[in-house]
Image (tube, rainbow, N blue to C red):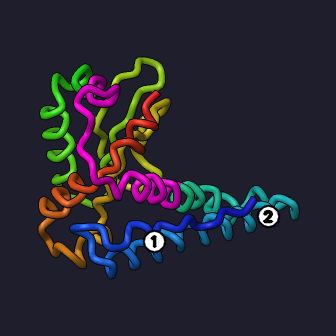
């Protein structure tokens, strides 16, 4: 099992995101892929050697979630960027947002309010796999706070590395740029 970093160079030149910011972000993502592979290999070796009861194995097991989720969340984030079209207001995603939040506008307002909160992390629009309901959720760390049994639909990275180079402390400006670049067809394809 070896993960290979995806290539997101097609996002270079995207309005509102400098190439410097994106290239730095791609490098950070590649580090998560490298560490996911490295920790996986170390766990396999410790298991083969029968060294599963010590702190090394335990800490690597805990760390694997951080690295793996860091890899996967970045992939989902990059894959829901690069769009040039607005959300189809008569499509299934718009209907589901209205059903869950009362209106698209109310959903957007709640998503942005969640994104502007102080702290570092992620904002994720989740769909509950059982009820189909949609929720905006703050994720503080890659491996903490995820809603069990829910599918990530739209992912926004609000760690400083995602915006500081271009926007400094103006997170609201970064969020506005993010909304101008959402690839809605990718987001809608994640909907169950």
Q: Identify which residue, 1 or 138, lies in the foreground.
A: 1
In the image, is residue 91 above or below residue 56?
above
Instruction: Compare marks 1 and 2 and give the one earlier in the sequence.
Output: 1
Residue at 16%, 54% in the rendered image:
116
Q: Identify which residue, 191 or 85, lies in the foreground.
A: 85
Mark 1 touches mark 2? (CB < 8 Å): no
> Quick check: is 65 in the magenta stretch?
no
Q: Residue furthest bottom?
A: 20
Picture coordinates of residue 86, whole percent (x, y): 23, 44
Which is closer to the viewer, label 1 or label 2?
1
Q: Is residue 55 visible?
A: no
Q: Please identify the quarter of the rendering in which residue 176 is found.
A: bottom left
> Quick check: is 81 in the magenta stretch?
yes
In the image, is residue 116 above or below residue 98?
below
Tell me: 175 left or right of 143: left
Tell me: 51 left or right of 71: right
Using a 10 Å C-alpha cutoff, classify the residue at mark 2 as few (fewer than 14 neighbours), some (14 to 19) or many (20 or more). some
How many callouts does the rendering have?
Answer: 2
Q: Secondary structure at mark 1?
A: helix
Residue at 30%, 32% in the rendered image:
135
Residue at 12%, 67% in the rendered image:
170
Whole-number angstrom distance, CA of label 1 to CA of label 2: 36 Å
Per the rendered image, the range of residues in magenta is 69-96
Using a 10 Å C-alpha cutoff, classify the residue at mark 1 as few (fewer than 14 neighbours), some (14 to 19) or many (20 or more). few
Q: Which label sits on residue 46?
A: 2
Q: Please identify the quarter of the rendering in which residue 68 is found.
A: bottom right
Identify the residue position indicated by label 1 in the image: 9
Residue at 13%, 63% in the rendered image:
173
- The N terminus: image quadrant: bottom right
């Amino acid at each position: 099992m070896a993960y290979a970093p995806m290539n997101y160079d097609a996002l270079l030149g995207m309005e509102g995101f400098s190439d410097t910011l994106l290239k730095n972000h791609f490098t950070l993502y590649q580090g998560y892929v490298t560490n996911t592979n490295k920790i996986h290999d170390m766990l396999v070796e410790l298991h083969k050697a029968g060294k599963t009861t010590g702190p090394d194995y335990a800490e690597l097991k805990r760390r694997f979630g951080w690295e793996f989720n860091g890899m996967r969340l970045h992939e989902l984030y990059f894959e829901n960027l690069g769009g040039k079209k607005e959300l189809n207001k008569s499509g299934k995603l718009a209907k589901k947002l209205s059903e869950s939040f009362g209106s698209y506008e109310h959903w957007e307002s709640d998503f942005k309010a969640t994104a502007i909160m102080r702290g570092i992390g992620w904002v994720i629009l989740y769909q509950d796999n059982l009820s189909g309901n949609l929720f905006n959720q703050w994720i503080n760390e890659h491996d903490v706070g995820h809603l069990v049994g829910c599918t990530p639909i739209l992912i926004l990275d609000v760690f400083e590395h995602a915006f500081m180079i271009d926007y400094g402390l103006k997170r609201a400006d970064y969020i506005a740029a993010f909304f101008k670049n959402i690839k809605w067809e990718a987001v809608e394809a994640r909907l169950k």
